Amino acid sequence: MNDTRVLLEFVYKNAEMGRKTIQPLSEMTDDEKFSKELVRIGNDYAEICADADKLLRENGMDEASGLNIAEKMMTEVSLRMNTIKDRSVRHIADMLIKGGSMGMSDISKKIEELTNADDKSRSLAKRLLDLNSSVIDDMKKYLTVAQ
């Protein structure tokens, strides 16, 4: 598999993980402002998924495969376990900071590893990196919110 395809598949999967995590979290909170911010972030992840899928097709490749069934189930179970006792804004923000940090680390490694990926796929990967960074920054302000 060529570097461009590998990077685009990775970007799609990583953004899908963000989107599938954010969506249920936005429904768990009673804080309307926080929920709206999560919906906006989820839409940003969805846009990156769509762009990755589009680039794959433009390069004559199949559509992105995304998360498999086991990964989807593990994500849902982990999300439920992490919010079963604490659905506070502070806790959810902390979860998103940790997830965003892991995502940034993974994306950075892939960008460095896949040196032969084309410029468009690398640019999209960097956009995802920037999105994760902004999510972390956005969520930091919620760590001090008394819930």
Image (tube, rainbow, N blue to C red):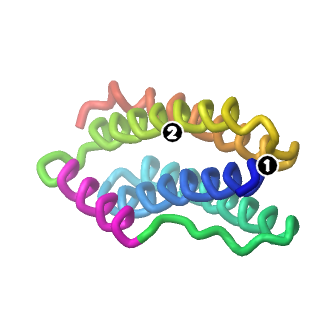
Asked if the stretch drawn in magenta spans residue 20, the answer is no
The x, y position of residue 19, in whole percent, is 51, 59
Between 27 and 130, the one lying in front of the other is: 130
Q: Does 68 sit left or right of 83 as displayed? A: right
Q: Does 114 sit left or right of 26 as displayed? A: right
Quadrant where the C terminus is found in the figure: top left
- The amino acid beneath tag 2 is Gly
The x, y position of residue 30, in whole percent, is 31, 56
Can residue 123 be seen by looking at this rendering? no
Which residue is painted at 34% across and 40% down in the image?
95
Look at the image and give the residue range highlighted in magenta.
Answer: 69-83
Quadrant where the N terminus is found in the figure: bottom right
21 shown above or below 57: above
Q: Does 136 sit left or right of 50 as displayed? A: left
Image quadrant where residue 96 sits: top left
Image quadrant where residue 68 sits: bottom left
Between 63 and 85, the one lying in front of the other is: 63
Asked if the stretch drawn in magenta spans residue 74, the answer is yes
Which residue is painted at 51% across and 39% down in the image?
103
Q: Which residue is mark 1?
A: 121
Q: Helix, strand, or loop for circle 1?
A: helix
Which residue is painted at 60% across and 55% down in the image?
45
- Neighbor class of circle 1 (other Cα within 10 Å; few <14, some 14-19, many 20+) is many
Disc on res. 103: 2
- The amino acid beneath tag 1 is Ser
Can residue 129 be seen by looking at this rendering? yes
Disc on res. 81: none
